[in-house]
Amino acid sequence: MIAKNLMDSNTVTLSAEATLEEVLDLIRRLKITDYPVVDSAMNYCGMLFEAEFFEKFCEKATTENAESLDAAFWESMKADFYKVRVRDVMNSKVRAFTADEPIEAIAAVMLFEKAPKVAVVDPHGKVIGVVALNRTLLNLIERFSSKAEEGKMARAISAPPTTEFQAEDPRNKRFFKRTAVTVPVAYRSASGNGKGSSEGKIAKTINVSAGGLLILTKEPLSPGESLNVALDIYQNNQPIRMVCRIVRCLPSPQPGAYEVGLMFVAIGIDERRRLDAHFEKSSA
């Protein structure tokens, strides 16, 4: 599956010189919240995400003295906000993709960059469509569970009944209740080589615990290596990112695949809360 199979070609682009007042008017009229941004030559130059620019607005408000947050303050804030240009708040780090790029590569970038949409461009850098994260992940999940996919792979993986998560040293074994979850998960090396690339690979989760993940990959991974990992466990365009350590890698019963155990090493407070909410909901 490649980008052109999933992209929405009925796409509206924004000028980098548009104001946020104009953007908000578009959002109200078109019910579209995220847009590719183009320069004066109509070449792709970034993405504008509604959630990001509202976050910047809120950040400015919270830096003010609470006593000054009267009606006049908010009117002044709104006036200033409306004048801001798209170029000043767009996300220029999210790259565009060509129509023939595989959706696995696209999903990995979107998960790591927390991008609900990415642009698809022609060979000249002109926007020809967008690919949405939720549609991409749903497609991957369907492929994981489809009979066609099972036919290609000799045997489908089902979540093991074990309730353990094993650390790399048996003397320090820890135990966590696991919940079976099958969603795409992006991973890439966290070796700190300085490249700063957002590229990654896609695997699928087998189960998740409070201590880590068990994932199914198409390649063997080395125990002890650190990985940056991202997954959208609720399929709500809010990926959870963390740093994990590979604690084991074993051949899967599924030919050509590997079951890789990952231990959480570092995770943000808000993202930990979302994981904890998942476990509470699963055990209810």
Image (cartoon, rainbow, N blue to C red):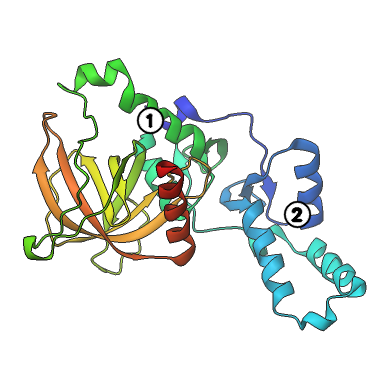
Which marked residue is nearer to the observer: mark 2 or mark 1? 1
Quarter holding residue 156: top left
- Label 1 crowd (10 A; few <14 / some 14-19 / many >=20): some
Q: Is residue 171 above or below residue 221?
A: below
Residue 236 relative to residue 100: left or right: right
Q: Which residue is mark 1?
A: 141
Q: Secondary structure at mark 2?
A: loop
Q: Nearer the viewer, residue 246 or 91?
A: 246
State the quadrant of the N terminus: top left
Type of the residue with mark 2: Ala
Residue 184 relative to residue 87: left or right: left
Q: Position of residue 28 (x, y in %)?
A: 80, 42
Would you say residue 19 is visible in this rendering? no
Type of the residue with mark 1: Ile
Quarter holding residue 202: top left
State the quadrant of the C terminus: top left
Mark with earlier residue (2, 1)? 2
Q: Secondary structure at mark 1?
A: helix
The residue positioned 36% from the left and 38% from the top of the image is: 183
Q: CA distance from mark 2 to mark 1?
A: 37 Å
Would you say residue 93 is visible in this rendering? yes
Q: Position of residue 79 (x, y in %)?
A: 86, 66
Q: Position of residue 269 (x, y in %)?
A: 45, 66
Q: Residue furthest right?
A: 72
The residue positioned 82% from the left and 46% from the top of the image is: 25
The residue positioned 28% from the left and 57% from the top of the image is: 211
Q: Which residue is mark 2?
A: 18
The residue positioned 18% from the left and 47% from the top of the image is: 260
- Callouts 2 and 1 close, C-beta under 8 Å: no
Q: Nearer the viewer, residue 189 or 11?
A: 189
